[in-house]
Image (cartoon, rainbow, N blue to C red):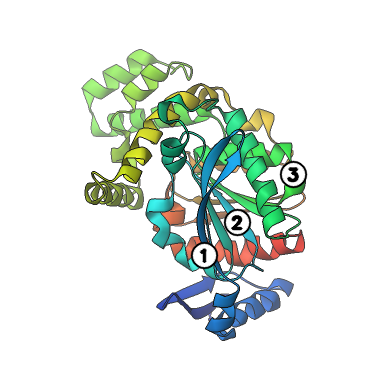
């Protein structure tokens, strides 16, 4: 472990399943610096055999809300805080990206969950006939899962991390049962569907005018002010929106497309794709209706947003506006440079540094 003499960073080189990984925690100073240094030193010095003996690597179906739902639990030490990942999409399950979470497992017990109507759960528990695929029911499922994880690992509280659509689910979970959660972490943080629609429209119109694209200008100006309840209109005028994504997000999309080619004819991947279509259609009314700036500004636990600075899908400005409205016992905002909507995938080291240096100490102090 070492400190950078020119700033307040702390770094450690650790071995994750035989692979050398670097964990750097940025901007650590004051009383927290000593605690983080001890944490990183422990990650370096603790014998591998000791960690492995207390680790867990398990996939299973658990009953939630009347159906069996798939979870995967991975971690090198069951004493670590439990971190439940609530995927976005809707239906964007995270098990195909398992390698991205390997460094997290050093200091967290990471739980992946294929939500009702998504991924393995879609394939196992009803397919297109899965009942009650709504925000309310999915959030209730998540609360049941949080209770199960707290019991299983003998924890007072767990950490929940929501990405994009998952940030809406996770905020709903925390809003309803704050006593279960030591911290909330949002990334690709949603404020509201209406704000997202207007932001994307404004960006497209500005780009068309800058490019002097008269056809596009005419189409967008004919709309005037987009109607957020008109989803057909939204999906039509945003048909080329991905061209405005930051480079890191476009590269991630290319990675996902290439990955899909290698997974063709795999039933699990077919369930993933079908689940995304089914989930997206099922929860769209809830997405359109939800406005966290109106419904969810009092959060009864520590509240963190770790956002790609260049996110244009769930716009960073809107995420910041929502963050500023939230009242919570503790809150912090981290903006990751040169990253967009998928910052937790494309800027993994910076994202993990924020989890380790900012979220983990506060969560542990609150019962994780």
Labels in figure, total? 3
Identify residue for label 1. Answer: 104
Please rate how many residues cluster around mark 2, counting C-alpha atoms within 10 Å: few if below 14, some from 14 to 19, many from 20.
many
Choose between 296 and 363: the one closer to the eye. Answer: 363
When asked about the image quadrant of residue 295, the answer is top right
Determine the CA span between mark 2 and mark 1: 9 Å
What secondary structure is found at the residue carrying circle 2? Answer: strand
Tags 2 and 1 in contact by the CB under 8 Å rule? Answer: yes
Asked which secondary structure carries label 1, the reply is helix
From the viewer's perspective, tell me whether residue 117 is left or right of residue 206. right
Q: Earlier in the sequence, mark 2 or mark 1?
A: 2
In front here: 31 or 185?
A: 185
Q: Residue 100 lies in what quarter of the image?
A: bottom left
Residue 334: x and y in percent read 57, 55
Between residue 244 and residue 124, name the one nearer to us.
Answer: 124
Rendered position, 125 above or below 41: above
Residue 5 at x, y percent in the picture: 54, 83
The N terminus, quarter of image: bottom right
Give the mark nearest the N terminus, 2 or 3.
2
Residue 178: mark in rendering: 3
**The C terminus sits in image quarter:** bottom right
Residue at the spot 23% in from the left edge and 51% down from the top edge: 262
Residue 328 visible in this rendered orientation of the protein? no
C-alpha separation, residue under disc 2 versus residue under disc 3 = 15 Å
Which residue is drawn at the image coordinates 34% and 53% (left, top)? 248
Return the disc, 1 or 3, that comes first in the chain's sequence. 1
Q: Position of residue 140 (x, y in %)?
A: 65, 35
Residue at image x 48%, y 63%?
A: 350
SS under mark 3: helix
Against 217, residue 80 (above or below) is below
Residue 83 is tagged as 2
């Amino acid at each position: 472990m070492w400190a950078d003499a020119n700033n307040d960073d702390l770094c450690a080189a650790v071995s994750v399943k035989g692979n050398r990984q670097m964990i750097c925690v940025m901007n650590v100073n004051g009383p927290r610096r000593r605690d983080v240094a001890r944490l990183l030193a422990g990650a370096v010095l603790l014998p591998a055999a000791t960690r492995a003996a207390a680790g867990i690597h398990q996939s299973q179906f658990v009953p939630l809300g009347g159906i069996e739902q798939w979870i995967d639990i991975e971690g090198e030490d069951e004493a670590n805080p439990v971190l439940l990942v609530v995927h976005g999409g809707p239906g964007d399950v995270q098990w195909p990206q398992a390698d991205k979470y390997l460094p997290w497992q050093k200091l967290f017990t990471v739980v992946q969950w294929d939500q009702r109507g998504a991924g393995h759960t879609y394939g196992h528990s009803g397919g297109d006939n899965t009942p009650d695929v709504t925000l309310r029911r999915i959030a209730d499922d998540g609360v049941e899962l949080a209770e199960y994880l707290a019991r299983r690992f003998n924890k007072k509280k767990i950490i929940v991390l929501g990405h994009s659509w998952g940030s809406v689910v996770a905020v709903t979970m925390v809003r309803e049962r704050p006593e279960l959660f030591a911290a909330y972490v949002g990334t690709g943080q949603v404020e509201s569907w209406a704000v997202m629609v207007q932001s994307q429209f404004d960006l497209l119109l500005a780009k068309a005018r800058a490019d002097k694209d008269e056809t596009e200008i005419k189409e967008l100006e004919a709309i005037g002010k987009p109607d957020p309840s008109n989803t057909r209109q939204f999906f039509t005028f945003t048909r080329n929106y991905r061209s405005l994504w930051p480079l890191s997000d476009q590269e991630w999309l290319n990675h996902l497309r290439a990955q899909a080619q290698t997974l063709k004819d795999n039933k699990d991947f077919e369930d993933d794709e079908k689940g995304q279509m089914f989930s997206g259609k099922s929860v769209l009314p809830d997405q359109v209706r939800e406005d966290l700036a109106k419904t969810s500004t009092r959060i009864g636990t520590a509240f963190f947003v770790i956002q790609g600075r260049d996110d244009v899908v769930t716009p960073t400005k809107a995420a910041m506006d929502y963050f500023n409205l939230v009242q919570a016992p503790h809150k912090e905002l981290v903006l990751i440079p040169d990253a967009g909507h998928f910052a937790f995938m494309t800027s993994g080291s910076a994202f993990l540094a924020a989890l380790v240096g900012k979220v983990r100490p506060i969560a542990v102090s609150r019962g994780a």
